[in-house]
Amino acid sequence: MNTNPQSGKEIVRIAVFGPGFGESIVIYIPGLGWGVIDSCLKNNNNPALDYLKKNNIRNIAFLILSHPHKDHYEGFDQIIDEYIGHIDRICYYSGDGIREYREYLIRQEILNYPGLKQLSDLFKKFEAAKNNGAQIVRIAERTEILRKNIYGENEVEILGLSPSAASVEKYKKLLFDAIPKNEGDTLNFLTDSQHNLISAAIWCSVGNIRLILGGDVEIGDDDHVGWKGIVNNIDSPDLSVQFIKVSHHGSSNAFYKPAWEKHCKHTKTIAVITPYNKTADPIPRKPDLERI
């Protein structure tokens, strides 16, 4: 929780859930309200939703889904169901190819696979929320999630830092290549790293406090993708921040030194990592922590 040292008034409150099994962030901005970035479940329990209900929250200013990984979207539908009709915005990653991919999977009945079916059902929840008053926003670089305005006593602005147009194009090509074209061809599933091409990173400014919520953005293999693309984008906002939710659970393929030099340029940065141990090789590793 950050406060204004002169007035003692609360500026922004952040709660991060899911270390070890997933990731979800709940943020409170005075004058604006509550937002949720991603969702996760542990033993079918939704820690972010429990937190909101415990605090008697009635309305959600924004819900954000950063990218299509189960450890970031599982339980998102429960939050929508709880607050439908009381959600101002639902924002999710760009990548038009996912629409065509999803429709193909439905036609081929491949979406019976639990993970894919769950993601398809979630998009139906988005549509239901839209029909109940929620605005739908697709996130890309420089997307205005929340236009700069005065809320309460602070100027607030929320922007998307990624995915870039180049990232989306690469992702669409990968999706096209994965879909069987001829009889006898098999469906190729994308790797986690390939899905991370379209992960959204969120930049938030509240008064003199700046935050970055990094999703699962990776370094990128050229100057137009991932953190390389963010750093090299001449229209990126000030990347010097007081708080950063470290991307991709603190893994080595998400640490880009020039980005961190910008994060820490003007202030001491608080970095929060959600470790992930549901694999044979848990992340972050010790050298990754030392780098960060």
Image (cartoon, grey):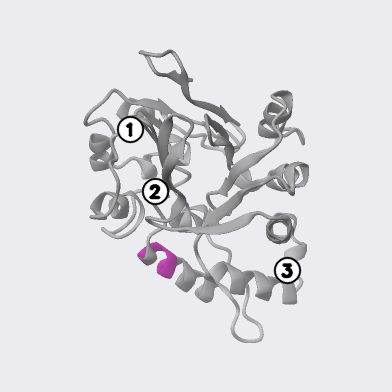
Residue located beneath label 1 in the image: 241
Residue sitting at 60 percent across and 79 percent down? 180
Q: Earlier in the sequence, mark 2 or mark 3?
A: 3
Q: Is residue 274 left or right of residue 127?
A: left
Nearest the eye: 289 or 273 = 273
Q: Earlier in the sequence, mark 1 or mark 3?
A: 3
- Residue 120 image offset from top left, x and y in percent: 70, 61
Rendered image quadrant of residue 122: bottom right
- For the C terminus, give its image quadrant: top left
Task: Report the span colored magenta.
Answer: 166-170
Is residue 3 positioned above or below 84 on the image? above
**SS type, badge 3:** helix
Tell me, yes or no, if residue 133 can be seen here.
yes
| Mark 2 touches mark 3? (CB < 8 Å) | no
What is the crowding at mark 3: few (fewer than 14 residues within 10 Å), some, or many (at least 20)? some
The CA span between labels 1 and 3 is: 43 Å
The CA span between labels 1 and 2 is: 18 Å
Is residue 73 positioned above or below 42 on the image? below
The CA span between labels 2 and 3 is: 28 Å
Residue located beneath label 2 in the image: 218
Q: Residue 110, which numbered label?
A: 3
Residue sitting at 36 percent across and 66 percent down? 166
